[in-house]
Amino acid sequence: MEELFVSRVRSKLLTLFLTSTEPLLHVREIVRRSSEEINAVRRELLRMEKFGMVASEWRANRRLYHFRKDYPFYRELLGLVTKTGGLGGAILKNRGKLGRIKYAMLATRYVKGLPSGADDVDLLVVGQIVLPELQSLLSDEQARKTAEINYSFMDETEFRFRIRRRDPFILKVVTQPKVMLIGDEDELLSGVVI
Protein backbone atom coordinates (compact mmCIF):
# COMPACT_ATOMS: atom_id res chain seq x y z
CA MET A 1 0.00 0.00 0.00
CA GLU A 2 2.89 2.38 0.65
CA GLU A 3 3.60 2.48 -3.07
CA LEU A 4 0.12 3.83 -3.82
CA PHE A 5 -0.69 6.67 -1.44
CA VAL A 6 2.41 8.70 -0.83
CA SER A 7 2.00 12.21 -2.13
CA ARG A 8 -0.20 14.80 -3.77
CA VAL A 9 2.04 14.66 -6.84
CA ARG A 10 1.52 10.89 -7.17
CA SER A 11 -2.23 11.39 -6.89
CA LYS A 12 -2.14 13.95 -9.72
CA LEU A 13 0.08 11.72 -11.86
CA LEU A 14 -2.21 8.72 -11.36
CA THR A 15 -5.20 10.81 -12.41
CA LEU A 16 -3.33 12.13 -15.44
CA PHE A 17 -2.05 8.74 -16.63
CA LEU A 18 -5.29 6.85 -16.04
CA THR A 19 -7.54 9.41 -17.76
CA SER A 20 -5.25 10.50 -20.60
CA THR A 21 -6.09 9.50 -24.15
CA GLU A 22 -2.46 9.93 -25.15
CA PRO A 23 -0.48 6.69 -24.95
CA LEU A 24 2.85 8.35 -24.09
CA LEU A 25 3.59 11.53 -22.14
CA HIS A 26 6.79 13.56 -21.96
CA VAL A 27 7.95 14.95 -18.59
CA ARG A 28 7.31 18.56 -19.63
CA GLU A 29 3.76 17.69 -20.69
CA ILE A 30 3.20 15.93 -17.35
CA VAL A 31 4.52 18.99 -15.49
CA ARG A 32 2.26 21.32 -17.50
CA ARG A 33 -0.87 19.23 -16.93
CA SER A 34 -0.24 18.49 -13.26
CA SER A 35 0.85 22.06 -12.34
CA GLU A 36 3.63 20.62 -10.18
CA GLU A 37 7.36 21.35 -10.03
CA ILE A 38 9.50 19.44 -12.52
CA ASN A 39 11.78 17.95 -9.84
CA ALA A 40 8.79 16.65 -7.84
CA VAL A 41 7.34 15.10 -11.00
CA ARG A 42 10.65 13.46 -11.92
CA ARG A 43 11.03 12.03 -8.40
CA GLU A 44 7.52 10.58 -8.49
CA LEU A 45 8.03 9.14 -11.98
CA LEU A 46 11.19 7.40 -10.77
CA ARG A 47 9.34 5.94 -7.77
CA MET A 48 6.39 4.86 -9.91
CA GLU A 49 8.75 3.25 -12.41
CA LYS A 50 10.56 1.44 -9.59
CA PHE A 51 7.24 -0.01 -8.35
CA GLY A 52 6.30 -1.05 -11.89
CA MET A 53 3.41 1.38 -12.23
CA VAL A 54 4.81 3.26 -15.21
CA ALA A 55 7.30 2.41 -17.91
CA SER A 56 9.41 4.73 -20.00
CA GLU A 57 10.96 4.58 -23.41
CA TRP A 58 13.22 6.79 -25.46
CA ARG A 59 11.97 8.26 -28.72
CA ALA A 60 13.80 10.91 -30.71
CA ASN A 61 15.99 11.83 -27.75
CA ARG A 62 12.98 12.25 -25.45
CA ARG A 63 11.95 10.05 -22.56
CA LEU A 64 8.24 9.24 -22.70
CA TYR A 65 6.15 7.62 -19.97
CA HIS A 66 3.01 5.50 -19.92
CA PHE A 67 1.03 3.70 -17.22
CA ARG A 68 1.42 -0.07 -17.39
CA LYS A 69 -1.89 -1.82 -17.92
CA ASP A 70 -0.36 -5.01 -16.54
CA TYR A 71 0.23 -3.33 -13.18
CA PRO A 72 -1.58 -5.57 -10.64
CA PHE A 73 -3.71 -2.74 -9.25
CA TYR A 74 -4.54 -1.04 -12.56
CA ARG A 75 -8.32 -1.67 -12.41
CA GLU A 76 -8.50 -0.68 -8.74
CA LEU A 77 -6.59 2.55 -9.35
CA LEU A 78 -8.79 3.34 -12.33
CA GLY A 79 -11.80 2.90 -10.04
CA LEU A 80 -10.27 5.15 -7.36
CA VAL A 81 -9.47 7.88 -9.87
CA THR A 82 -12.98 7.63 -11.33
CA LYS A 83 -14.66 7.84 -7.93
CA THR A 84 -12.65 10.80 -6.64
CA GLY A 85 -12.84 13.21 -9.55
CA GLY A 86 -14.80 14.20 -12.60
CA LEU A 87 -18.32 12.92 -13.14
CA GLY A 88 -17.87 9.87 -10.90
CA GLY A 89 -16.73 12.00 -7.99
CA ALA A 90 -19.59 14.46 -8.55
CA ILE A 91 -22.17 11.67 -8.54
CA LEU A 92 -20.81 10.22 -5.29
CA LYS A 93 -20.52 13.64 -3.66
CA ASN A 94 -24.12 14.54 -4.58
CA ARG A 95 -25.61 11.09 -4.07
CA GLY A 96 -28.13 12.31 -1.50
CA LYS A 97 -29.49 14.99 -3.85
CA LEU A 98 -29.80 12.55 -6.76
CA GLY A 99 -32.44 10.35 -5.12
CA ARG A 100 -32.24 6.67 -4.18
CA ILE A 101 -29.68 5.20 -6.56
CA LYS A 102 -29.34 1.41 -6.60
CA TYR A 103 -26.63 1.25 -9.31
CA ALA A 104 -24.48 3.79 -11.10
CA MET A 105 -21.71 2.86 -13.50
CA LEU A 106 -19.41 4.63 -15.93
CA ALA A 107 -18.06 2.93 -19.04
CA THR A 108 -14.30 2.41 -18.88
CA ARG A 109 -14.10 3.86 -22.38
CA TYR A 110 -15.56 7.13 -21.07
CA VAL A 111 -13.26 7.17 -18.03
CA LYS A 112 -10.22 6.85 -20.28
CA GLY A 113 -11.46 9.69 -22.49
CA LEU A 114 -12.03 7.53 -25.55
CA PRO A 115 -14.74 8.51 -28.04
CA SER A 116 -18.22 7.03 -27.74
CA GLY A 117 -20.28 5.67 -30.57
CA ALA A 118 -23.83 6.90 -31.15
CA ASP A 119 -25.29 3.79 -29.49
CA ASP A 120 -22.78 3.58 -26.61
CA VAL A 121 -23.82 4.46 -23.05
CA ASP A 122 -21.23 6.26 -20.92
CA LEU A 123 -23.32 6.40 -17.73
CA LEU A 124 -26.09 4.14 -16.48
CA VAL A 125 -28.06 5.08 -13.36
CA VAL A 126 -30.69 2.76 -11.89
CA GLY A 127 -33.05 3.81 -9.10
CA GLN A 128 -35.43 6.62 -8.13
CA ILE A 129 -33.56 9.56 -9.65
CA VAL A 130 -34.09 13.30 -9.26
CA LEU A 131 -33.59 14.04 -12.95
CA PRO A 132 -32.91 17.82 -12.74
CA GLU A 133 -30.05 17.17 -10.28
CA LEU A 134 -28.53 14.49 -12.53
CA GLN A 135 -28.87 16.69 -15.59
CA SER A 136 -27.17 19.54 -13.76
CA LEU A 137 -24.16 17.35 -12.97
CA LEU A 138 -24.08 16.08 -16.54
CA SER A 139 -24.22 19.56 -18.06
CA ASP A 140 -21.35 20.71 -15.81
CA GLU A 141 -19.24 17.72 -16.90
CA GLN A 142 -20.15 18.20 -20.57
CA ALA A 143 -19.08 21.85 -20.39
CA ARG A 144 -15.81 20.87 -18.70
CA LYS A 145 -15.02 18.12 -21.20
CA THR A 146 -16.63 19.85 -24.19
CA ALA A 147 -18.11 16.52 -25.21
CA GLU A 148 -21.57 15.03 -24.96
CA ILE A 149 -22.19 12.30 -22.38
CA ASN A 150 -24.44 9.45 -23.48
CA TYR A 151 -26.43 8.39 -20.45
CA SER A 152 -29.41 6.26 -19.57
CA PHE A 153 -31.48 6.09 -16.41
CA MET A 154 -34.35 3.91 -15.29
CA ASP A 155 -36.02 2.66 -12.15
CA GLU A 156 -35.10 -0.73 -10.71
CA THR A 157 -38.32 -2.41 -11.84
CA GLU A 158 -37.74 -1.46 -15.47
CA PHE A 159 -34.09 -2.47 -15.23
CA ARG A 160 -34.89 -5.96 -13.87
CA PHE A 161 -37.68 -6.38 -16.44
CA ARG A 162 -35.29 -5.53 -19.28
CA ILE A 163 -32.64 -7.90 -17.86
CA ARG A 164 -35.18 -10.75 -17.67
CA ARG A 165 -36.31 -10.02 -21.24
CA ARG A 166 -32.64 -10.04 -22.35
CA ASP A 167 -33.00 -6.57 -23.86
CA PRO A 168 -29.96 -6.21 -26.20
CA PHE A 169 -29.46 -2.57 -25.20
CA ILE A 170 -29.23 -3.31 -21.46
CA LEU A 171 -27.13 -6.44 -21.98
CA LYS A 172 -24.62 -4.43 -24.00
CA VAL A 173 -24.48 -1.68 -21.36
CA VAL A 174 -24.05 -3.94 -18.32
CA THR A 175 -21.52 -6.29 -19.94
CA GLN A 176 -19.19 -3.57 -21.25
CA PRO A 177 -16.02 -2.78 -19.27
CA LYS A 178 -17.13 -0.42 -16.51
CA VAL A 179 -16.37 1.20 -13.20
CA MET A 180 -19.13 0.73 -10.63
CA LEU A 181 -19.75 3.98 -8.75
CA ILE A 182 -22.68 2.78 -6.67
CA GLY A 183 -23.86 -0.77 -6.07
CA ASP A 184 -22.36 -4.20 -6.43
CA GLU A 185 -21.38 -5.43 -9.90
CA ASP A 186 -22.23 -9.07 -9.11
CA GLU A 187 -25.70 -8.02 -8.00
CA LEU A 188 -26.06 -5.79 -11.07
CA LEU A 189 -25.23 -8.73 -13.34
CA SER A 190 -27.40 -11.28 -11.51
CA GLY A 191 -29.80 -12.72 -14.01
CA VAL A 192 -27.57 -11.86 -16.97
CA VAL A 193 -26.53 -14.99 -18.86
CA ILE A 194 -24.03 -14.32 -21.59
Image (cartoon, grey):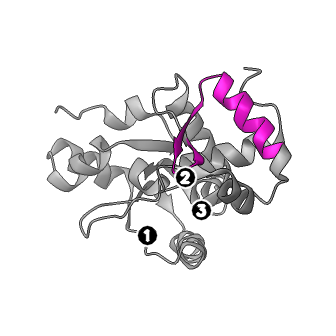
Q: Read off the residue under disc 1.
A: 149
The residue tagged with tag 2: helix, strand or loop? helix
Q: Is residue 107 left or right of residue 73?
A: left
Disc 3 and disc 1: Cα gap in Å? 17 Å
Q: Read off the residue under disc 2.
A: 19
Q: Amino acid at mark 2?
A: Thr
Residue 112 picture location, percent across and down: 47, 52
On-image quarter of the N terminus: top right
Asked if the residue at tag 3 contacts the one at tag 2, i.e. Cβ–Cβ closer than 8 Å, the answer is no
Q: Identify which residue is drawn at 31% across, 51% down.
A: 159
Disc 1 and disc 2: Cα gap in Å? 16 Å
In front of the other: 44 or 134 = 44
What range is drawn magenta here?
A: 40-65
Task: Point out the frontmost of discs 3 and 1.
Answer: 1
Point out the tag, 1 or 2, that comes first from the N-terminus. Answer: 2
Asked if the residue at tag 1 contacts the one at tag 3, i.e. Cβ–Cβ closer than 8 Å, the answer is no
